[in-house]
Image (cartoon, helix red, strand yellow):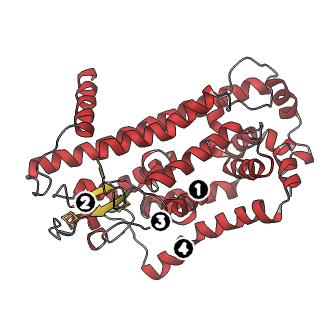
């Protein structure tokens, strides 16, 4: 096992820094297979890593809440759990805009939000296909379903297009409420409200105390994600909408060199977002999730690469792409922790007394 990891790391380093084979010639079948395996393996390693991080954070958080419920303090609350409170992060962004200060209630969630946005600004929606555990679960579910039933559904264009705009409408709804309807004072009040101060615990109870209605909605989403790849990410996720919007500005995009392209169409067939890659000069679409499946499928290495825009036109190899994403996302979190912008100002003692009175009306969502 350790030898395999060593070999993979050495391969990763060589591919990120060393010379490559003649990029203008089609690869031989074995070399193409190996290249596909390498790029898929890179993404798979990244997805597993972040999924395991999420599971560990979830398990630590559940243990911490059980302890708080007993009125005991001592365990560390994992700040990463705030990644699942994106509305609070959006409110923190408005608060920063208004006051120039980071709200101390959910700083970890805000840092994660900024790190995710930074990945969208630089490298398309790569966060969705390399990091996000919901994207990973969605992709694996679709893979399982394809193996079981032999095919997946893809919605006709007349239905796909309006459904894709749903996530933008959701984002617009939240953004307009936070940036237009609410005043700066409203935002400050919300951030410091009893609801927001225990929003992480309330989120856990939301999933633990599953009503039949909530259960049916979640079940429907799981089934839809199993038969329609990336259903949640493609049609409903407001985070995906934000990234899609930011990704239009991204300098790193999959770029096709028409002179080297042999028109085999393999890239289009490999694209999970159903983009006509083989017909595009540069993939600008907000639906590109930066998965590099098209790049891995292309038999001519120079024909399809991730590139910076002209006039600089520098190719970024898949290994370097993965490293930049890891450093950008993981590094932002490490830097924020080192700078002391991570821990909430809600003390464990405050959690203990608030958790006892969660049933009271002032813990409802502020209107
Ligand atoms: S296959 Fe290529 S074009 Fe399609 S989503 Fe992935 S990176 Fe974007
Ligand atoms: S860019 Fe697409 S169509 Fe052109 S060679 Fe590569 S996989 Fe084939």
User: Do callouts 4 and 3 mark residues in contact (Cβ within 8 Å)?
Assistant: no
Crowding at mark 4 (Cα within 10 Å: few <14, some 14-19, many 20+): some
Q: Is mark 4 within 8 Å of ligand 1?
A: no
Q: Residue at x 34, y 62 (%)?
A: 310
* Residue 82 seen by the camera: no
User: Of circles 1 and 3, which is in front?
Assistant: 3
Q: Which mark is residue 163?
A: 4
- Quarter of the image where the C terminus is located: bottom right
Q: CA distance from mark 2 to mark 1?
A: 28 Å
Task: Give the residue at mark 2.
Answer: 304
The residue mark sitting in front, 4 or 3, is 3
Residue shown at 24%/42% (left/top)? 38
Structural distance between the alpha carbons of marks 2 and 3: 18 Å
- Secondary structure, mark 2, is strand
Q: Nearer the viewer, mark 4 or mark 1?
A: 1
Q: Residue furthest front?
A: 311
Residue 75 % position (x, y):
69, 19
- Name the N-terminal-most of marks 2 and 3: 3
């Amino acid at each position: 096992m350790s030898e395999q990891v060593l070999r993979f790391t050495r391969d990763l380093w060589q591919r990120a820094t060393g010379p490559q084979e003649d990029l203008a010639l089609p690869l031989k079948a074995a070399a193409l297979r190996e290249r596909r395996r390498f790029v898929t393996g890179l993404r798979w390693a990244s997805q597993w890593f972040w999924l395991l991080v999420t599971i560990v954070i979830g398990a630590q958080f559940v243990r911490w809440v059980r302890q708080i419920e007993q009125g005991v303090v001592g365990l560390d609350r994992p700040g990463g759990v705030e990644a699942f409170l994106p509305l609070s992060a959006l409110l923190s962004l408005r608060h920063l805009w208004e006051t120039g200060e980071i709200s101390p209630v959910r700083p970890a969630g805000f840092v994660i939000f900024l790190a995710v946005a930074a990945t969208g600004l630089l490298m398309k929606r790569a966060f969705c296909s390399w990091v996000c555990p919901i994207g990973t679960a969605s992709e694996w579910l679709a893979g399982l379903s394809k193996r079981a039933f032999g095919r997946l559904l893809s919605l006709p264009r007349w239905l796909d297009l309006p459904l894709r705009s749903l996530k933008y409408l959701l984002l617009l709804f939240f953004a307009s409420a936070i940036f237009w309807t609410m005043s700066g004072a409203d935002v400050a009040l919300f951030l410091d409200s009893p609801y927001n101060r225990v929003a992480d615990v309330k989120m856990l109870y939301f999933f633990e105390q599953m009503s039949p209605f909530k259960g049916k909605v979640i079940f429907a989403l799981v089934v839809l994600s199993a038969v329609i790849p990336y259903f949640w990410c493609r049609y409903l996720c407001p985070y995906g909408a934000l990234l899609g919007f930011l990704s239009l500005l991204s300098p790193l995009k999959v770029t096709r060199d028409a002179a080297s392209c042999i028109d085999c169409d393999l890239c289009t067939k490999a694209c999970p977002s159903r983009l006509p890659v083989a017909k595009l000069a540069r993939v600008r679409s907000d639906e590109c999730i930066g998965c590099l499946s098209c790049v891995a499928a292309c038999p001519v290495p120079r024909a399809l690469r991730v590139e910076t825009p002209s006039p600089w036109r520098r190719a970024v190899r898949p290994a370097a792409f993965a490293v930049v994403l890891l450093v950008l996302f993981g590094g932002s979190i490490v830097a924020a922790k080192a700078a002391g912008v991570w821990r909430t100002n809600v003390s464990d003692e405050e959690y203990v007394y608030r958790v006892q009175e969660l049933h009271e009306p002032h813990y409802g969502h502020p209107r």
